[in-house]
C-alpha cells in the first residue's frame, strides 16, 4: 500500500505519543489491536466490512447532526455532556479498516481508501495537516484522501474518549482543548467519508 500504509503508521505513532503524554492508561495501539482482532474473528468479507463501516459512519453522523457543537464551547473534556457524546461515537470498524490486513491493489477497499473526497470547511473551523502540523483551512473546502479522513476520525474520537477520564487537576496541565472545533472537524470528515461510501457498489443501493 506504500504511501497509504506510511500515513497510517505515522498517524498511529502520533496518537500513541499524544496518549502517553496525556497519561492514558492504555496505549492507543493496544486498544486498536483489540478492536481489529474482534472484527477479524467475525471473518467478514471486504464488502461486508465496508457496509458495516457505512452504518458506523451513518450512526455517528446521525448523532453529530443533532448535536449543537457550539454548546460544547465552554465545556471541559471530562464534563458529563462530553462523556455522553463521546460514549455514543463508534470507531471500531474505522480502526479495523485502518489497522487490518492491507487491501490488495485493485480491490474495492484499496480504491476507496485512495480516493479523494471534498471536506467542507464548516463555519471556518476545519483544520488539516500540512507540513507536519495542523493548520486552519482558509478556503471553503479542500480535498483529502479517504485514508487520511478515516485515520483523522479514529484518532480524534479516541483521544477525546481518553480525555473524558481525566481529573480536573490533570486537565489543568494540558493546553486548552477546543471542543467545538474538534466536533466540527470530526463531523466534516464523517460527512465526506459517507459521500464517498454512498457511491460504492454494494452500498449505493442502500445509501441514505
Image: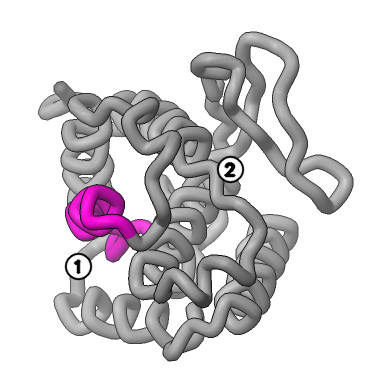
Name the element at disc 2: helix
Circle 1 is placed at which residue position? 44
- What residue sits 38% from the left and 45% below the top? 75
Residue 71 in the image: state x and y as whole percent. Answer: 32, 30
Marking on residue 22: none
Q: Main secondary structure of the magenta part?
A: helix
Q: Residues within 10 Å of mark 1 (few under 14, many from 20)?
A: few
- What residue sits 50% from the left and 60% below the top? 155
Residue 175 in the image: state x and y as whole percent. Answer: 66, 58
Q: Is residue 79 left or right of residue 24?
A: left
Within the image, what quadrant is residue 114 found in? top right
Q: Nearer the viewer, residue 83 or 142?
A: 83
Q: Is residue 72 left or right of residue 102?
A: left
In the image, the segment drawn in magenta is 79-96
Tags 2 and 1 touching, CB below 8 Å: no
* Image quadrant occupied by the N terminus: bottom right
- Whichever of labels 2 and 1 marks the residue nearer the N terminus, that label is 1
Q: Nearer the viewer, residue 124 or 118?
A: 124
- What residue sits 41% from the left and 53% below the top? 76
Circle 2 is placed at which residue position? 114
Name the element at disc 1: loop
Real-space CA distance between mark 2 and mark 1, rounded to the nearest whole angstrom: 21 Å
Q: Nearer the viewer, residue 96 or 175?
A: 175
22 up-or-down from 189: above or below:
below
Q: Does residue 61 appear in the picture of this structure? A: yes
* Image quadrant occupied by the C terminus: top left
92 up-or-down from 129: above or below:
below
Residue 112 in the image: state x and y as whole percent. Answer: 46, 41
Q: Is residue 74 left or right of residue 120?
A: left
Residue 2 in magenta?
Answer: no
Within the image, what quadrant is residue 77 found in? bottom left
Residue 201 in the image: state x and y as whole percent. Answer: 27, 33
Amino acid at each position: 500500500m506504500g504511501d497509504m500504509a506510511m500515513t497510517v503508521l505515522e498517524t498511529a505513532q502520533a496518537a500513541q505519543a499524544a496518549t502517553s503524554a496525556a497519561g492514558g492508561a492504555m496505549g492507543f495501539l493496544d486498544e486498536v489491536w483489540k478492536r481489529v482482532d474482534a472484527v477479524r474473528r467475525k471473518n467478514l468479507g471486504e464488502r461486508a466490512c465496508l457496509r458495516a463501516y457505512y452504518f458506523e459512519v451513518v450512526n455517528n453522523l446521525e448523532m453529530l447532526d443533532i448535536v449543537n457543537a457550539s454548546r460544547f464551547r465552554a465545556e471541559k473534556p471530562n464534563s458529563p455532556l462530553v462523556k455522553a457524546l463521546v460514549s455514543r461515537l463508534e470507531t471500531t470498524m474505522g480502526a479495523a479498516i485502518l489497522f487490518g490486513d492491507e487491501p490488495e491493489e485493485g480491490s474495492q477497499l484499496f480504491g476507496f481508501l485512495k480516493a479523494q473526497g471534498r471536506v467542507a470547511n464548516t463555519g471556518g473551523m476545519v483544520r488539516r495537516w500540512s507540513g507536519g502540523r495542523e493548520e486552519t483551512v482558509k478556503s471553503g473546502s479542500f480535498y483529502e484522501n479517504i485514508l487520511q479522513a478515516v485515520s483523522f476520525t479514529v484518532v480524534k474520537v479516541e483521544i477525546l474518549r481518553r480525555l473524558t477520564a481525566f481529573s480536573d487537576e490533570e486537565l489543568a496541565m494540558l493546553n486548552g482543548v477546543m471542543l467545538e472545533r474538534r466536533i466540527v472537524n470530526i463531523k466534516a470528515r464523517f460527512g465526506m467519508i459517507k459521500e464517498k461510501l454512498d457511491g460504492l457498489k454494494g452500498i449505493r443501493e442502500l445509501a441514505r
